[in-house]
Amino acid sequence: MSFFDELRRRNVIRIAGLYLVGAWFVVQVAETLLPIFDTPGWVLKALVVLLALGFIPALVFAWVFELTPDGLRRERDLAPETPRVDGTTRKLDVAIIVLLVGVAALTLWRSNPVSTPSTVSPQAGAKPATAEAASPRSIAVLAFDDLSAEGDQAYFAEGVSEELLNLLARIDGLKVAARTSSFKFKDGAADIGEIGRALNVETVLEGSVRKAGDQVRVTVQLIKVSDGFHLWSQSYDRKLENIFAVQDEIAAAIVQALKLKLDLASATAGRTENTAAYDHYLRGRELARTPTQSGLLRAIEQYEQAVALDPQFAAAYAGIADAWVWLEDYGGVKSSESFPRAEQAAKRALAIDPESAEANAAMAFVLDRYHDDAAGARKAFERTLQLNPNYVTAYNLYADTLYDLGEFELALENRRRAVERDPLSVFFRARLANTLGNLGRDDEARSILDQLFEEFPDNDFAHEEMGNLEQKRGHFAAAFRHYRSLHDARPGDPFAAAQLSRLALLFEDRALERAWVDASRARGEDNRWELLASTWLGFAHGDWEALDAVAALHAGYRAAQLRGAVAARRGQWPEARRHLLEAVDLAKAKSGDLELRLATVPLIDLAWVERELDIDGWQERLAPVRATLEKYQAFGINDLNHFDAAYYHRARLEALMGRREAALAALRDGSPIRVPPEFLQHDPVFAAWRDDPDFLALVADKRAHAAAERVKLEGVSLLP
């Protein structure tokens, strides 16, 4: 008998087949079940190794022993005539068949899963989605759980997952859900199917971090949304100093699982290798998440500690720059203090890492807010999105710049892109509503805000944008209530108080005006919103000395524009012309095109001054202004910026040209919105019609409307 025949006789070949099929089945079941119990990745590896090591002993066992009706017997003790095929052989054949059926059933089940209906409702501004319709290469990175003994490392766990999110966002061809939306599912109440459908992604990365002293364990699972099965899972037990290597390994494994490409060296350039600096950076980023005065100041302290430990930490410098810009807006810090610091930090970040999306976005933010350089900011934002197409914050800020450039539809498109990438972000949805309202699409804006209030009844961003929308529509009482709620909800933000002073101006209540200007000032002396409120009141009441004081606190374009406007109203024509020419030149240098909002107001005043000086060609100054204002009118836009109402300056342009009916029509377009009754007395452009019955009737209508709105506030505490 040949050796092969002897192997068959002793059932060694059948045992080998049974062992291999059984081992494969056990591994597949383990791969499915072990991650559910947060089992470390080495357990599955150990199981595979043990099964492999057991293969040879199993064959030896089959050669030496035989299963008989009398039990397990050594082969050499059996009589030659002992039946085998009808006994042990048949049992082995049945076992192999059963295992093969099990393998087939498992394979069929994994390839044809039963879908679970979603209970997550679609968000405003986001397209309805199903897991099957998700992008073929898309992922959401959930906030990693903090499994540390003290439960005080949530910021670190979330920081690790956010760094992974940012790393993956650099991959060309991979759509990455933004942090705000993906981290909404932190509590684990939603299943993977719900998450995938809500965020319109194909895969989800979830995990946990256990940090103890200088040791850290990171456990991650990459899950396919359509069937809930794990594409890959792993656990890493390392020293804390190796956390960056762990992040890189996880990213590389995900890239391999999704069959993508990532230039890891480029993606991690400018990253710190100092774990203490990294810890401060994560704390700072968490504090800066919601733009409050106290949070932003504490965030800067953390970022500064990070760069003290690692002076080459580009992302921390970018964080410092962003925080200072937001402090000028939300924190009541004067621009002369915040903007230079922001620019210094942004330049430092770019010098360290010119390829950093965060550094480029920080510089774009500075160019737009500090230098009024919308054209320069546009280039920087485009570079940012080229470096990281998934950088959702850049889409939102870029929209502001595009709006300033008169690219209204493109601005709206970028607002929608931000919401598409971060559909659960209240801030981005509120900003989308703001742009829709500015473009005259009030119904869509209100629909978004109504939904936000339904979900978050006391949300400050919703109150802010609803206040803006109601004020624009002339619903002053409703706007007052929303701004009052906003003022109470944000203790360090002077914005709402400034808006309330403007409403008090329309109510013709000087004491109330002053009270709210003082309330704005109390949140930061000479802050942007206090100066804006003082500007509104100064022009409304003809308080040129107050406007001189405001102009002295500005620099560049805004200082020149205000000084020119005040000098013109005083009849100081040569001085006015000098300042206004400077303002127009600065506007042109920043936009590259006079037919943009920044040059519109100083050009109107310049035409007026040159008319009074009998300088030929003053009418030509108004040609680009008319084109710009007609563009704004076509889009239904009321405001050129926070300072100037578009329809009011259309009326001023027509008044300069002596077109009474056209000036009246423009003012009626804006009625009953935001032109104070004193405009006839304090704007010399309208001096010829101060006793005109039609102009006086228009003023009377505005007074009556404001008085009716004031009545609606009876019983409401109007003072700060």
Image (tube, grey):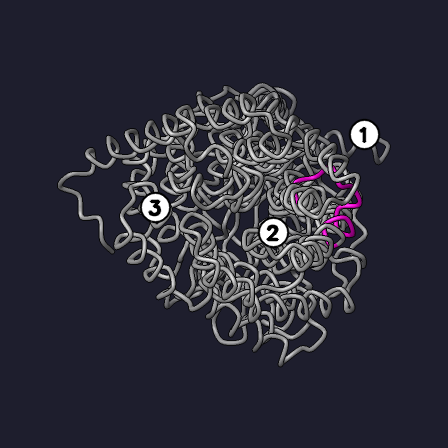
Compare marks 2 and 1 and give the one earlier in the sequence. Answer: 1
Do the residues bearing badges 2 and 3 touch, measured as CB atoms within 8 Å? no
Q: Tell me: residue 521, above or below residue 693.
A: below
Q: Tell me: residue 34, above or below residue 279.
A: above
Q: Is residue 421 magenta?
A: no
Compare marks 2 and 3 and give the one earlier in the sequence. Answer: 2
Compare marks 1 and 3 and give the one earlier in the sequence. Answer: 1
Report whether residue 34 is seen.
Answer: no
Q: Which residue is denoted by mark 1 in the rendering?
A: 5
Residue shown at 83% from the left, 32% from the top: 4
Q: Which residue is denoted by mark 3 in the rendering?
A: 505
Element type at marker 2?
Answer: strand
| Residue 712, percent from left and from top | 20, 33
Report whether residue 318 is seen.
Answer: yes
Main SS class of the magenta portion in the image = helix
Cα distance between the residues tagged 1 and 3: 105 Å
> Label 1: few (<14), some or many (≥20) within 10 Å?
few
Please state which of residues 539 and 126 is positioned toward the viewer in this rendering: 539
Q: Which quadrant of the figure has residue 62?
A: top right
Q: Which residue is denoted by mark 2 in the rendering?
A: 234
Q: Amino acid at mark 2?
A: Gln
Single out the mark in the foreground, 1 or 3.
3
